[in-house]
């Protein structure tokens, strides 16, 4: 085939791809040339979670740090697996119970968890970049009873539609579920906890003056089900009970040390109004500015 | 907070964190490796290049190089060095506008390549250029840093700025006016944080410098995109169920309009603008995540400003979630980085904006800044 004819065919392929809206390179199991990432998020209310991941066919798994509720671990596939976008992946998700579960997480020094998983599942040959390329492959551990795991993968992307065609995802929410601990995870231990990333903020007046002694509390994001519009089964998603509490200093500044992830920050005072009093954030946050004014 | 606004807020968090971002951009399969590059010798002789890539072979650190790429449809020229992380991939280390020679200094030893970027309407068959390269004894001087002055036009938050022209009331305008000073200071502070470990120095309106400086202006305007605009304008429709909100606006651009990028940071006193009014919400059905809090305002406007500064020093769009993603500064309500990514080029073809990823060309701002700025 001449170069020109080859180019013309390539051009036609591209035009067809564009017309279809979203474009894939080559369907199948092969790796993609695009460099993408994965994000593992723990939206459980109380359990800690870690993810082990490898490219299908490779020997060793790479394991994320142990994520407290609300936390997210983001990493490029190139850094984790040595490949820009793996065609298929194997996953292991292990969940661990807290030891001091009567103490709010943010006040639990050391945040100890059990030495063995309360639940753990393995999924082999999961379609990834060989089927659909997504910039960030999300793997989200949802809230579930102790001893069970519910994991949502690729939510809101074409990959979700691909996965829903698999028997393991053929359920109402298109999630991967498991009970107990898969034999493959029998000797899994909890990894070191994810390192803290600060949530910094200031409560100030409109002219920039810091306000001291304003209460600030922190909640973590959770999710139970996909549909958040059905009031008969609430809550499907939301924010936990407070996990940490602090007050602003003389400059109006406050700070929380929690792993990067999804949180709700709330400020409160008997004498002030806030714009706004509640802010949902993805940390780390360099500076969160909250404007306050005296109650009329 | 109204229920709608609360839902909008939750939606932002959920989509920003829990939902994946789909790669909706075509990949050019002919451009996913450097192996197809045409070899050219460093003797100054012209070679005809049919396509984008030419190989310069091995070059040593400290060598001076002159590159001249010309063609009716050629618009930019990039110098690439073979990537350390992946085979067949080149990492951007310098660049310039096409059709004029430019000199560069090789920063690190390795195989080097020339990439020619053509005008958007150029069909594949018209992508031809003549390229020559030669070693030079006299090394070009490079600046130690790029100074960027951040300027705020009067009433940048309210005229119209972020004031909602449908549902806004006097109290909303008064509030925006009251926080203008805070927002201004926070944006400058945020930009300084973003560029803290780079050769880009952010200064405020009140600070002076003897060095040539770029200017980033925050304008209160809301700018509707022209059908032919391919700059930082056209977000793909976010919600087709609300067509009244599907207005293509320009969030920011390098000036003069159409400049897009200064490859290699060859123009030390260029300008860019962020159109604050383009972020405004319009009534109950067209809410804007940019205005839910001071934090959102600062985050959105500072990250958009950082994006435009990236273009001022020669950074391209990338497909990865990053400050140089073409939609990231509005679509993601979290702090983003300047990180490694594969460049994405937007073209206007037959009236349609088409973005294309070049998998073989990686932009890593840390490597690029180290290459185009002098260490001393």
Image: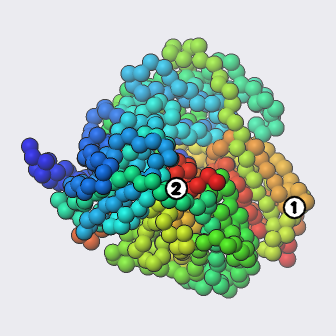
- The percent coordinates of residue B214 (x first, y second) are 58, 71
SS state under label 1: loop
Residue at the image point whose x is 62% and y is 69% from the top: B148
Badge 2 element: helix
Specify the quadrant of the image occupied by residue B296.
bottom right
Task: Looking at the picture, tell me which residue is in the foreground, B279 or B241.
Answer: B279
Checking the image for residue A251, the label placed there is 1
Applied colour scheme: rainbow
Q: Is residue B219 above or below residue A146?
A: below
From the viewer's perspective, is residue A157 above or below residue A63? below
**On the image, which quarter does residue A208 sit in?**
bottom right
**Image marks 2 and 1: residues in contact by CB distance under 8 Å:** no
Which residue does the numbered mark 2 point to in the structure image? B372
- Depicted A202 relative to depicted B83: above or below: below
Q: Residue at x 79, y 44 (%)?
A: A244
Task: Say which of A118 and A263 sits in front.
Answer: A263
Q: Nearer the viewer, residue B231 or B4?
A: B231
Whether residue A288 is situated above or below residue A206 in the rendered picture: above
Q: Are marks 2 and 1 on the same chain?
A: no
Image quarter (top left, top right, bottom left or bottom right) of the C terminus of chain A: bottom right
Mark 2 or 1, closer to the camera: 2
Is residue B178 found left or right of A40 in the rendered image?
Answer: right
From the top left corner, tell me how far across and down residue A56 is, in percent: 39, 25
Q: Position of residue A254 (x, y in %)?
A: 81, 54
Residue B193 position, x and y percent, is 68, 57
Q: Quadrant of the N terminus of chain A?
A: top left
The residue positioned 48% from the left and 20% from the top of the image is: A60
Which residue, as the protein is rendered here, is positioned at the far left? A1
Q: Is residue B119 left or right of residue A263?
A: left
Q: CA distance from mark 2 to mark 1?
A: 40 Å
């Amino acid at each position: 085939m001449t170069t020109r004819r080859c180019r013309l065919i390539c051009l036609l392929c591209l035009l067809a791809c564009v017309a279809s809206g979203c474009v894939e390179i080559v369907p199948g199991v092969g790796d993609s040339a695009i460099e993408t990432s994965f994000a593992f998020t723990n939206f459980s209310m109380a359990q800690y979670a870690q993810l082990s991941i490898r490219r299908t066919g490779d020997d060793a798994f790479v394991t994320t740090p142990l994520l407290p509720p609300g936390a997210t671990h983001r990493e490029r596939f190139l850094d984790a697996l040595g490949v820009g976008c793996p065609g298929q992946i194997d996953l292991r998700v292990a969940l661990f119970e807290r030891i001091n579960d009567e103490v709010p997480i943010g006040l639990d020094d050391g945040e100890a968890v059990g030495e063995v998983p309360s639940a753990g599942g393995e999924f082999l040959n999961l379609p990834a970049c060989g089927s659909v390329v997504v910039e960030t492959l999300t793997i989200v551990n949802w809230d579930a009873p102790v001893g069970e795991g519910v994991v949502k993968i690729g939510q809101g992307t074409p990959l979700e539609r691909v996965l829903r065609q698999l028997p393991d995802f053929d359920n109402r929410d298109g999630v991967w579920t498991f009970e107990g601990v898969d034999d493959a995870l029998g000797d899994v231990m909890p990894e070191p906890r994810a390192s803290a990333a600060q949530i910094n903020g200031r409560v100030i007046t409109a002219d920039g003056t810091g306000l001291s002694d304003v209460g600030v509390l922190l909640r973590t994001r959770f999710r139970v089900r996909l549909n958040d519009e059905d009031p008969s089964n609430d809550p499907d998603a939301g924010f936990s009970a407070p996990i940490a509490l602090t007050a602003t200093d003389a400059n109006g500044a406050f700070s929380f040390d929690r792993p990067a992830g999804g949180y709700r920050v709330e400020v409160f005072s008997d004498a002030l109004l806030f714009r706004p009093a509640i802010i949902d954030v993805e940390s780390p946050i360099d500076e969160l500015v909250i404007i306050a004014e005296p109650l009329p | 907070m109204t229920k709608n606004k609360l839902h909008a807020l939750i939606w932002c968090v959920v989509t920003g964190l829990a939902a994946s971002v789909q790669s909706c951009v075509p990949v050019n399969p002919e451009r996913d490796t450097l192996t197809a590059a045409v070899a050219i010798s460093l003797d100054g002789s012209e070679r005809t290049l049919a396509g984008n890539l030419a190989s310069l072979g091995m070059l040593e650190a400290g060598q001076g190089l002159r590159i001249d790429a010309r063609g009716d449809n050629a618009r930019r020229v990039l110098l690439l060095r073979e990537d350390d992380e992946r085979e067949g991939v080149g990492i951007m280390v310098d660049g310039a506008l096409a059709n004029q020679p430019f000199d560069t200094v090789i920063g690190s030893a390795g195989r080097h390549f020339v990439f020619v970027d053509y005008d958007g309407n150029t069909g594949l068959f018209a992508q031809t250029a003549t390229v020559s390269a030669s070693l030079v004894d006299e090394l070009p001087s490079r600046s130690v840093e790029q100074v960027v002055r951040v300027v705020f036009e009067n009433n940048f938050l309210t005229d119209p700025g972020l004031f909602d022209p449908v549902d806004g009331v006097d109290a909303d305008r008064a509030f925006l006016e009251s926080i203008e000073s805070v927002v201004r200071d926070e944006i400058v502070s945020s930009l300084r944080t973003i560029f803290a470990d780079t050769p880009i120095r952010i200064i405020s309106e009140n600070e002076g410098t003897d060095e040539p400086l770029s200017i980033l202006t925050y304008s209160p305007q809301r700018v509707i995109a022209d059908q032919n605009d391919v700059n930082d304008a056209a977000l793909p429709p976010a919600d087709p169920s609300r067509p009244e909100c599907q207005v293509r606006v320009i969030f920011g651009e390098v000036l003069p309009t159409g400049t897009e990028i200064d490859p290699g940071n060859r123009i030390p006193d260029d300008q860019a603008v962020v159109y604050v009014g383009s972020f405004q919400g319009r009534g109950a059905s067209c809410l804007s995540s940019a205005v839910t809090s001071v934090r959102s305002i600062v985050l959105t406007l500072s990250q958009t400003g950082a994006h435009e500064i990236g273009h001022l020093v020669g950074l391209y769009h990338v497909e990865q979630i990053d400050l140089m993603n073409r939609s990231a500064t509005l679509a993601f309500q979290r702090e983003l980085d300047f990180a490694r990514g594969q460049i994405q080029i937007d073209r206007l073809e037959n009236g349609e904006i088409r973005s294309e990823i070049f998998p073989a060309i990686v932009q890593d701002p840390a490597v690029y800044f180290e290459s185009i700025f002098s260490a001393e």
